[in-house]
Image (cartoon, rainbow, N blue to C red):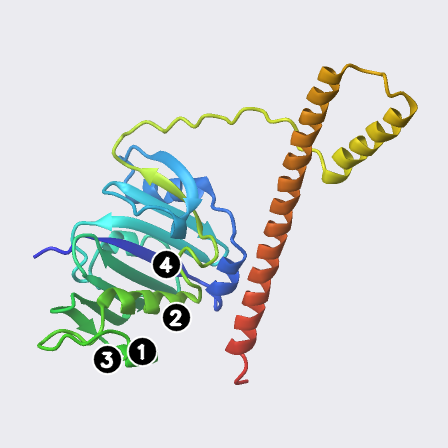
Amino acid sequence: MSNPAVVTLWFVNTADPAQVLEGEPKADRGFGRKLLAQLNPAWPITPIGEFPLNRSSLPSRNEFYIAGYPGVAVVQTFVDDAGALSTVAPELRQGLPAADVYLFAEGTESDFAGFAHFAGPTLQRALTATRDVVIEDVGLPDPFEAPYWAGEKAEQIGGISLPFEPKDLARAAQETWIGVDVSPSGPDINVVGYAIDGRPEPRIEKPAQREETKSVEHVAARFAQRERDADYDDYEGSPDATGEQDGEEFAQLVDASVAAAKRVTRIVRRRVRAARSALIERIRHSDR
């Protein structure tokens, strides 16, 4: 029985991949194209978009999501059968030189999942399974696996079933080895999507040119100036024209207020992420 899955490969050449990913680096479009051309020069490679890996839909057959950062690279793609991660897609796994290569699989048609770790060319650990069947189990369990094997992370259903959900353990392995939460609540993992089936590059409509949003202070100052002018000449301007102008300036004030609120929200988010990263770093080194 085959186990179709989306497989994510991490190529790591740094002692702290989390520090790299927390900075949310931008993906290089040329990096993925060169990698795919190296794997198969005959593929017709089409860029299909740029987006965060952890906030996007999963790749379909003939699609790759790729990014290269300083000391870290990631490739995500669909595999028809990921039952044995120790042997799956060897040309892809060996496509980039890396001190450590981590693979994570999540089934698309079942509860199948798994993970594997290569130190250089040497397999250190591999586990793939469904809740009822262990397909591959190589190497000694890592410490993070202990509560899952002990049945502390899932409801027990008895029989020959595993005491955990394979997808939960695979996600825990990824967070432990890569160092960040690879989910929508984690930092953006910016990638470029590519297709190799000859489809045309999607057309992206450019947004219409928007009038620059004025600041709250600018619009408020215009209101104040109009009030002062009105004190000098109560008869200047018709009521209709004045009302129309008031409505336009009020709309500008609303736009300015919304823009200011968005700026504050972005600042707060950046500071929260920075504080979270600093706290994780302090906890990681607290035993030294």
Left-right relation of 118 to 161: right
Q: Position of residue 264 (x, y in %)?
A: 64, 50
Which mark identifies residue 142? 1
Q: Residue furthest bottom?
A: 287
Q: Are marks 2 and 1 in contact (CB under 8 Å)?
A: yes
Residue type, mark 4 in image: Trp
Mark found first going from the N terminus, 4 or 2: 4
Find the distance from the CA under tag 4 to the CA under tag 2.
13 Å
Asked which secondary structure carries label 3, the reply is loop
Which mark identifies residue 151? 3
Labels 4, 2: front one: 2
Q: Position of residue 111 (x, y in %)?
A: 18, 61
Name above or below for residue 244 compared with residue 119: above
Residue at image mark 4: 10
Q: Position of residue 155 (x, y in %)?
A: 22, 74
Residue at image mark 2: 176
Labels 4, 3: front one: 3
Find the distance from the CA under tag 2 to the CA under tag 3.
19 Å
